[in-house]
Image: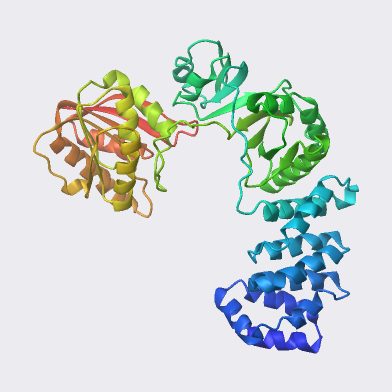
Amino acid sequence: MVGEKYERLKTGQDLRENLIALKQELKEREAVQELVSILQGDYSLLAGLLGHSDPKVRKNTAIVLGRLKQKENAPVLFEAYEKETQRFVKSDYLKALAELDDSSCIEGLERHLLELEQYQPKEEEEKHIREELLALRKLVNKGTSNKKHQFCGYDDTWELILTTGKQYQEITANQVKGGQVTILKSGVRVVTSHIKPILAIPTYRELLFALNIRKISDDPKEAAKALAGSNLLKLLQKAHKTEDAFYFRLGVHSSRSLEQRSAFAKKCAFALEQESRGKLKNSASNYEVEIRLLENRQGQFLPLVKLYTFEKERFSYRRHTIAASIKPEHAALVARLAKPYMVERAQILDPFCGVGTMLIERDWLCPAKMMYGIDIFGEAIAKAKENTRLAHKEIYYINRDFFRFQHNYLFDEIITNMPDRGRKSQEEQNKFYQAFFEKAAELLKDKGKIFLYCNEKNYVKKQLRLHKEFSLLQEFSMDEKENYYLFILSYA
């Protein structure tokens, strides 16, 4: 099939259609290998089509050359990029070059990037200039990180928003020592000159910096002007003690459709680059600053800033995760809600321990005598051991099915994040929870506790009705949508 389409290109007929068809086939690795074998290093036909009078022929030819991933085509593509007069085609040459893993054109690309960053486009050009800029930056910064700044403002005063959700703001607020604290609808506002202790608080979801403006327009260009006129740049310069440029992304949190949010973000981010005169540079993936826009009921936005430039993030021990891992801030919140029922020097078991987060966070809060973590997934156990070493904790991990686990003494406490249902049927999930309660009864001491984090409220309630030896001490809804719960249970 690939050979047939290439033979049709030789005739010069229906070039655009045949290139599109060839381009689609070359998404498969086998098709790429077949065409490379057919060409045997002779790319002259395709190189010639880069000079065709039809811009869409040039565009699709560039994509085809990129998918072949042959470095010798880099100079040809770069030359065609420099000669190209149609803006909508230029980014495709760059995307093709990005697939070749060739650095021979880097100086020329850097020159074009500098020129384009200083270019003032007409309104009808903006979309294509944005695409070209992003593609150029991806090429120029390939193999390097844009995250070149480090946060230095530990002794400065900041207005912060710690997001928590709508239910447990007080738990985070009570951990703030010093500064002005205000409980908000979905978080905590803190004005402080001691940011290091704030960074160590484990229960908030995100730390965001407030700007000196509270509302900006839902028009992307007006929003960009307002952001550029705010203290945004001064905040970044103060936090990092530099006036260098910063790479950023724009995050729009809104009830609008994904397409509407994406269109707004692209236009606003591009306008902000221009308004900041290059001090802010948009990067979709390799950024060090996120400008977060939260939509209010009136359709305007509250702007906040998230930084990725701190020396150490919270949960620095948690270097390894798996797909099913509980978020560490959730584990920390579970531990604090359960703390009134914990005892020090307890013997603790997590039967579905994953990478160890629940046990580690529980031990920070109330030191245990002995901790065991069990998981049937061997990769999780290996990662849990490494995380535990980094946390300087002592936990015994066992790669085993919990329901086959035996131990020569009983436990004071079971704490766990119950596995999600996955592909289990309702009947299978019901049997799973039944087996869990039966096994827990075998392993717990009299008056032992279970701290159960899960998204299966009905199965837990059913087992509590069937197993009278367990009593419900307290129940917490853990999120606004009431998907996850924490159950605190006592045995016998």
Quarter the N terminus occupies? bottom right
- The residue at the point 78 percent across, 43 percent down is 270
Residue 404's spot in the image, x, y percent?
16, 49
Q: Quadrant of residue 44?
A: bottom right
Q: Is residue 192 above or below residue 378?
A: above
Can you see residue 94? yes
Q: Is residue 105 above or below residue 286?
A: below
Residue 193's spot in the image, x, y percent?
58, 14
Can you see residue 453? no
- The residue at the point 62 percent across, 18 percent down is 159
Identify which residue, 270 or 73, lies in the foreground: 73
Q: Residue at the left extreme? A: 408
Q: Is residue 23 above or below residue 448?
A: below
Q: Residue at the right extreme? A: 122
Identify which residue, 332 or 439, lies in the foreground: 332
- The residue at the point 62 percent across, 46 percent down is 286
Direction from residue 205 to residue 71 in the image, left or right: right
Residue 211's spot in the image, x, y percent?
69, 23
Q: Is residue 191 above or below residue 486?
A: above
Q: Quadrant of residue 300?
A: top right
Identify which residue, 228 or 393, lies in the foreground: 393
Direction from residue 203 to residue 64 in the image, left or right: right
Identify which residue, 19 or 141, lies in the foreground: 141
Quarter the C terminus occupies? top left
